[in-house]
Image (cartoon, rainbow, N blue to C red):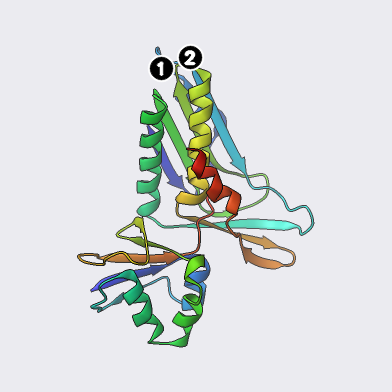
Amino acid sequence: MMDILYFAWVRERIGVPRERIETSAKTVSDLVAELCGREERYQLAFSDLSSLRVAVDQELSDFDASLAGAREVAFFPPMTGG
Amino acid sequence: MYISVQDQPFDLGTVSAEFASGHTNTGAIVTFTGLVRGGAEDRLEAMEIEHYPGMTEAALNAMAENAISRFSLGDALIIHRYGRLVPGEMIMMVATAARHRKDAFDAAEFLMDYLKSRAPFWKREISDSGASWVASKDEDEDALSRW
C-alpha cells in the first residue's frame, strides 16, 4: 500500500488531499500512468508534468525515480514559500 | 537552531531579541521578515498558505543546517506561517548569527532563496476578483544557481 498526497491546485483537480492505493508501479512515471488510466480527473491534474513536482517519502524527487520501498508519494506544483 | 512552522503570529521583537542574546562569539545578526503584500490593482483580501506537514519541517531543518555549515554561522532561525493571513501580517522570518556581517547577510539570502522554491509551501491569493494560486517565478529558481 502507498499513500499518495496532493497539494494546491493538484489537490483541487483530483478532489482529495490524500488516498491510499495498491500499486505495483516501479517508478513515479509508472504511477502517474496508472493513475491517469483510472479517471479523467487524474489526466487533468497530470496533463503537464513540467508544471509538477514530486516528493518520494518527503524528499524532492524526479519522475523517473524508483518507487522501491516507497511509502508516500506527493504531487504538487512548484513551491512558493518565503 | 530554531525552526517553527506555525499558524499563529509571532512577535518579531521578542523572537529577534531572544535570538540575539547569549552569543559571545558573534559579531553580526541579520533578520529578514516577509509580510503579506497588498495587491497593486486587485484588492488582496487574504493569502492562504498550504504546506506539507512533515516534509516542511524536514526541508527547513536541512536548509538551516546547510546555511550553518556553509557560512560558519553560530545560529540560524526560520519561522514560517501557514493558514489564512491578511495584508500586513508577517508570513515568515529568518535570522542568522555570524562572526561578521557578510556571512550573516549571505546566509539570510541563501535561506530566503531556498525557502522560495524548495520549501513545500503554496500560496493562494484571495482578491476581489477571485482566488488564484501564486505561480512560481523563473527568477526564483534561477536565484538558486548562485549558491
Q: In this view, does B18 lie above or below A4?
A: above
> Left of B58 or right of it: where is B97?
right
Q: Which amino acid does label 1 sit on?
A: Gly
Residue visible at 34% across and 66% down?
A64
> Left of A28 or right of it: where is B124?
right
Q: Which amino acid does label 2 sit on?
A: Gly
Which residue matches tag 1?
Answer: B22
Residue closest to the eye, B8 or B32: B32
Q: Quadrant of the N terminus of chain A?
A: bottom left
Q: Is mark 1 on a helix, strand or loop?
A: loop
Residue visible at 51% across and 29% down?
B106
Residue A39 in percent (x, y) is at 42, 87
Q: Specify the subunit that label 1 lies on.
A: B
Residue B116 in percent (x, y) is at 53, 48
Q: Are marks 1 and 2 on the same chain?
A: yes
Residue closest to the eye, B63 or B17: B63
Q: Earlier in the sequence, mark 1 or mark 2?
A: 1
Residue visible at 50% across and 63% down?
A77
Q: Residues within 10 Å of mark 2 (few under 14, many from 20)?
A: few
Which residue matches tag 2?
Answer: B27
| Tag in front: 1 or 2 | 2
Residue closest to the eye, A75 or B92: A75
* Residue A70 marker: none
State the residue lying farthest toward the left.
A69
Q: Please indicate, yes or no, whether residue B118 appears anywhere in the rendered image.
A: yes
Give the total of numbered labels. Answer: 2
